Image (cartoon, coloured by chain):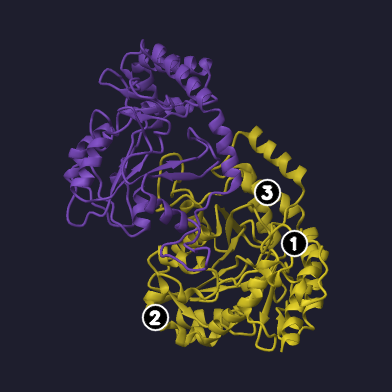
Chain colours: A yellow, B purple
C-alpha cells in the first residue's frame, strides 16, 4: 500500500493509485462457502430448481420468523416484489414517494401505470418529511411508499397517521433495511407490507432476489398467486400475474447468509466505526449516523461534503476514482430529474429543495464485511489528504 | 401471455390459429389488425414452428413490430433458418422445464443493434454509466448463477436433444398401436428439439379428454391438457378482444401433453402407453365406473 504523506502522493497528481484493484460500493457479504455449495448439491439432488421448492419454503419460514412477521413471499428481485405489492394493494392514480431514493421505487409504479409523485425529505434523516408528504396529497392519491433509506427507518408513525387520516395505503420500500429496527421492532412488520431487496449489493443477499413481508393474510395469498402467473393448481389461473419466483439456488444463498448474519453485521459495524472515527474530525465532512438505540446492518457508509471541505463533492469522487476507490454519488440527481419523470414534472424541483441539496453533497464509500480495515484507513487517508492538499494550495 | 400485455397497459386481442401448425399465421393475424394495433405477438407452438415468414411479411406490410414468443422452439429451425432470428426480436425462457435450463431466466434475441442497445440499458433500471437515465428501466438483469446453470445446460444440449429424440421415437413406435391417439410429429426436415410429446385424441378415442386426464392423474401420470382452457375463455380483470375463435376452442379440447424430459425413461414410456392402451381397451367399463363415482 502506498504511503500518503503529501498531496503529491495522490493519483490525481500523478502518483500510482492507492489500490491495484478497484474497490466497489456494495461488495457482497457472503457466508460460509462450503455450506452454500452443500445446499446447491441438495438442490440438484432434490431435482427441484424453481416453482416454490423446499429451499424457498425454508427461506420464507426463516425470514418470517427472524423478522417476527406472519408472511414472507420471496421473489426474483426487489423491483418485481415492489410491482407485485403495488398491484396486490390495488394502488392506482398517484402514489407519493421520495425522489431521493433508488429509481426502482418510481419505476415500479410507472410500469403499473401509476404516477409517482415526489415528496421532499428531511435533510437530517434523508427520509420522507411527513409535512412534505401532506403537501403532495391530491384527490387522485391512493398510497404512500416510504423508503427506509440507508437502513434508517422512515418516520413510520407519522406516515401511518397521514395514511389513516386520508384513507391511503402505506407500504415501505425496505430494500436497505434488512437488519434494521424502528422503536426496537424489526423492519418488515410495518404498513400494509414491506418490500426487501436481496440483491448482491445489499447487506443481506440471495445473489439477486427480494421479498414482501406482511401480516395481512389476504394480501399474502394474492401476492403468492401473482408471482406465479396467477396459477392456483395445475391449469387454473385465478389472478393476473407475472413470473416473480425466487429460484432454489438464490434461497440456498439466502439461508447460508442468514446463518452468518451476526458475523457479517459485526464486521460491517466495525468497518463503519473505523470510517467514522477517521473521517469525523475532517472539517466539511459529516458521516451519516445510525441511532445507537436501534439495530442496523451498518452496510452503508454515507458521507456528506459541504463547502468547508474545499474540493467539491464531484472533485472528491473523481479523486477517489483515480485511486481505484469507486465511491458513488447514489441517487444523484434525484428521481425527479431522471427520465421519464423530469418530462412529467419539469418544475418538481421547486418542491424538492432538500432532496436537491442532499443529492449534491452525498458520497457513498466502499463498505461490506469483506473490506479490510487497512483498506478503510487508506481510503480515509486519501480523503484527509484531499482536504489538506486544498488547504496548502490556498 | 395476456397478463403480460395487460401488465404494460396494452389490450390483448386474441387471434385464431392455423389447424395445421396450431399456431398463429399471417391470414389469421391479418383479420385482427386495426388502427389500434401496436404489436404482433406471435407464439411458436410446442411442437414445430408457426409460419413465421408469413408473419414477418404481414408485420412489414402493416408497419407493425413483430415479437415472437419462441419459448418452446429453442434450437429449432424454420425453413433451415434458426429460430431466434425472426421479427424484431424473439423471446426465450430458461425455466427449469425448458431445453436450456438456467433455474429460471430468459433472453431476447434480435438482429437490430439499436433495439439490443435499448434492451441492455432498460434491463439495468435504465440507468446509464454516467448516471443519466432512459425511460422504462426495470430490474431484469440475469444473475451469474442462472448463467452458470445455463452454460452447463448448453454443454449438454446435443446429448439432451438426442435423448429427446430417442424418447420421441419410443413414444412414436409404441403409440402407433393405440387406436384413437395420434402423436404430433416433429417436422424432421427441420432441426428439432424433440422435447414435447403431444398427442391428439381423435374421434376413435372412446373417452373425453377430461376423463382420460383424470385416470392418468390418479395413476400419477401428470399429463396436461395442451392449452386448456384457451386464454380467451379465462376470466380476466382487464379488457380483452376475442371474436370468433371456434377453431381454437375446438382444438383446445383435443390435445394432451404427455410426460417427457430427462426423468422419463423407456420403462416409463412403455408404462404410460400401456396405460393408454388399457384405457382404450376397457373404455366402457372405465366410463361406467367413473360416472358411478
A123 relative position to A300: left or right: left
Q: Residue at x 20, y 39 (%)?
A: B26
Q: Quadrant of residue B185?
A: top left
Are the residues tagged 3 and 2 within 8 Å (C-beta)?
no
Residue that label 2 marks: A346
Q: Which residue is mark 1?
A: A19
Do the numbered discs 2 and 1 sit on residues whose CB atoms are within 8 Å?
Answer: no
Left/right of residue B252 with respect to residue B215 in the rendered view: left
Task: Determine which residue is flagged by label 3.
Answer: A253
- Residue B179: quarter of image: top left
Q: Residues within 10 Å of mark 3 (few under 14, many from 20)?
A: many
| Mark 3 residue element | helix
Quadrant holding the N terminus of chain A: bottom right
Q: Position of residue A185 (x, y in %)?
A: 70, 71
Q: Nearer the viewer, mark 3 or mark 1?
A: 1
Could you tell me if residue A115 is visible in this image? no
* Residue A265 placement (x, y as % from top left): 77, 63
What kind of element bears circle 1? Answer: loop
Closer to viewer: mark 3 or mark 2: 2
Vertical comparison of B99 with A229: above or below? above
Residue A227 or B158: which is nearer the viewer?
B158
Q: Chain of mark 3?
A: A
The quarter in which the C terminus of chain A is drawn is bottom right
The answer to which of marks 3 and 2 sits earlier in the sequence is 3
Foreground residue, A387 or B252? A387
Q: Residues within 10 Å of mark 1 (few under 14, many from 20)?
A: some
Q: Is residue A26 visible?
A: yes
Compute the Cα span from label 3 to label 2: 43 Å
- Residue drawn at x 37%, y 75% is A343
Amino acid at each position: 500500500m502506498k504511503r500518503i504523506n503529501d498531496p503529491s502522493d495522490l493519483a490525481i497528481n500523478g502518483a500510482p493509485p492507492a489500490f491495484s484493484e478497484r474497490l466497489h460500493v456494495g461488495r457482497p457479504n457472503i457466508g460460509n462457502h462450503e455450506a452454500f455449495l452443500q445446499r446447491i448439491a441438495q438442490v440438484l439432488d432434490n431435482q427441484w430448481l424453481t416453482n416454490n421448492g423446499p429451499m424457498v419454503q425454508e427461506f420464507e419460514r426463516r425470514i418470517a420468523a427472524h423478522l417476527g412477521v406472519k408472511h414472507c413471499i420471496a421473489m426474483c428481485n426487489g423491483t418485481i416484489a415492489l410491482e407485485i405489492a403495488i398491484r396486490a394493494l390495488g394502488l392506482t392514480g398517484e402514489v407519493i414517494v421520495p425522489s431521493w431514493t433508488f429509481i426502482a421505487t418510481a419505476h415500479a409504479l410507472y410500469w403499473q401505470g401509476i404516477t409517482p409523485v415526489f415528496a421532499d425529505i428531511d435533510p437530517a434523516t434523508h427520509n420522507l418529511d411527513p409535512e412534505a408528504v401532506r403537501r403532495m396529497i391530491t384527490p387522485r392519491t391512493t398510497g404512500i411508499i416510504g423508503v427506509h433509506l440507508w437502513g434508517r427507518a422512515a418516520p413510520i408513525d407519522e406516515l401511518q397517521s397521514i395514511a389513516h387520516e386520508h384513507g391511503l395505503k402505506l407500504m415501505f420500500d425496505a430494500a436497505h433495511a434488512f437488519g434494521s429496527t424502528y422503536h426496537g421492532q424489526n423492519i418488515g412488520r410495518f404498513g400494509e407490507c414491506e418490500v426487501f431487496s436481496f440483491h448482491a449489493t445489499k447487506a443481506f443477499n440471495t445473489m439477486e432476489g427480494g421479498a414482501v413481508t406482511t401480516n395481512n393474510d389476504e394480501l399474502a395469498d394474492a401476492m403468492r398467486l401473482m408471482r406465479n402467473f396467477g396459477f392456483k393448481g395445475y391449469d387454473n389461473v385465478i389472478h393476473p400475474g407475472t413470473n416473480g419466483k425466487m429460484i432454489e439456488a438464490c434461497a440456498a444463498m439466502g439461508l447460508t447468509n442468514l446463518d452468518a448474519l451476526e458475523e457479517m453485521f459485526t464486521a460491517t459495524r466495525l468497518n463503519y466505526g473505523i470510517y467514522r472515527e477517521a473521517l469525523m474530525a475532517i472539517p466539511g465532512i459529516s458521516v451519516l449516523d445510525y441511532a445507537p438505540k436501534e439495530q442496523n446492518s451498518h452496510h452503508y457508509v454515507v458521507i456528506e461534503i459541504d463547502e468547508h471541505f474545499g474540493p467539491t463533492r464531484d472533485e472528491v469522487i473523481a479523486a477517489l476514482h483515480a485511486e481505484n476507490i469507486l465511491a458513488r454519488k447514489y441517487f444523484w440527481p434525484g428521481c425527479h430529474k431522471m427520465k421519464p419523470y423530469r418530462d412529467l414534472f419539469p418544475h418538481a424541483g421547486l418542491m424538492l429543495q432538500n432532496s436537491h441539496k442532499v443529492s449534491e453533497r452525498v458520497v457513498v464509500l466502499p463498505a461490506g464485511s469483506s473490506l479490510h480495515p487497512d483498506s478503510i484507513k487508506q481510503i480515509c487517508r486519501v480523503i484527509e489528504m484531499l482536504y489538506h492538499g486544498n488547504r496548502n494550495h490556498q | 401471455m395476456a397478463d403480460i400485455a395487460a401488465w404494460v397497459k396494452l389490450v390483448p386481442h386474441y387471434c385464431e390459429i392455423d389447424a395445421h401448425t396450431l399456431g398463429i399465421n399471417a391470414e389469421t393475424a391479418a383479420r385482427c389488425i386495426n388502427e389500434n394495433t401496436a404489436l404482433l405477438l406471435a407464439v411458436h407452438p410446442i411442437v414445430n414452428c408457426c409460419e413465421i415468414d408469413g408473419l414477418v411479411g404481414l408485420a412489414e406490410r402493416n408497419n407493425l413490430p413483430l415479437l415472437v414468443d419462441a419459448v418452446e422452439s429453442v434450437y429449432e429451425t424454420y425453413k433451415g433458418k434458426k429460430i431466434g432470428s425472426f421479427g424484431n426480436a424473439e423471446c426465450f425462457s430458461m425455466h427449469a422445464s425448458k431445453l436450456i435450463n438456467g433455474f429460471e431466466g430468459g433472453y431476447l434475441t434480435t438482429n437490430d443493434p439499436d433495439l439490443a442497445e435499448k434492451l441492455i440499458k432498460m434491463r439495468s433500471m435504465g440507468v446509464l454509466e454516467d448516471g443519466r437515465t432512459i425511460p422504462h428501466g426495470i430490474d431484469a438483469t440475469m444473475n451469474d448463477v442462472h448463467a452458470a446453470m445455463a452454460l452447463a445446460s448448453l454443454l449438454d444440449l446435443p446429448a439432451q436433444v438426442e435423448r429427446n429424440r430417442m424418447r420421441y421415437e419410443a413414444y412414436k413406435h409404441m403409440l402407433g398401436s393405440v387406436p384413437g391417439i395420434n402423436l404430433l410429429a416433429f417436422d424432421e426436415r427441420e432441426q428439432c428439439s424433440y422435447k414435447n410429446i403431444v398427442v391428439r385424441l381423435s374421434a376413435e378415442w372412446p373417452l373425453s379428454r377430461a376423463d382420460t386426464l383424470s385416470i392418468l392423474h390418479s395413476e400419477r401420470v401428470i399429463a396436461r391438457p395442451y392449452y386448456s382452457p384457451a386464454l380467451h375463455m379465462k376470466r380476466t380483470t382487464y379488457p380483452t378482444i376475442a371474436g370468433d375463435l371456434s377453431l381454437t376452442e375446438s382444438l383446445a379440447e383435443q390435445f394432451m401433453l404427455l410426460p417427457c424430459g430427462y426423468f422419463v425413461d423407456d420403462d416409463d414410456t412403455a408404462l404410460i402407453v400401456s396405460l393408454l392402451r388399457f384405457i382404450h381397451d376397457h373404455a366402457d367399463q372405465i366410463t361406467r365406473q367413473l360416472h358411478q363415482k
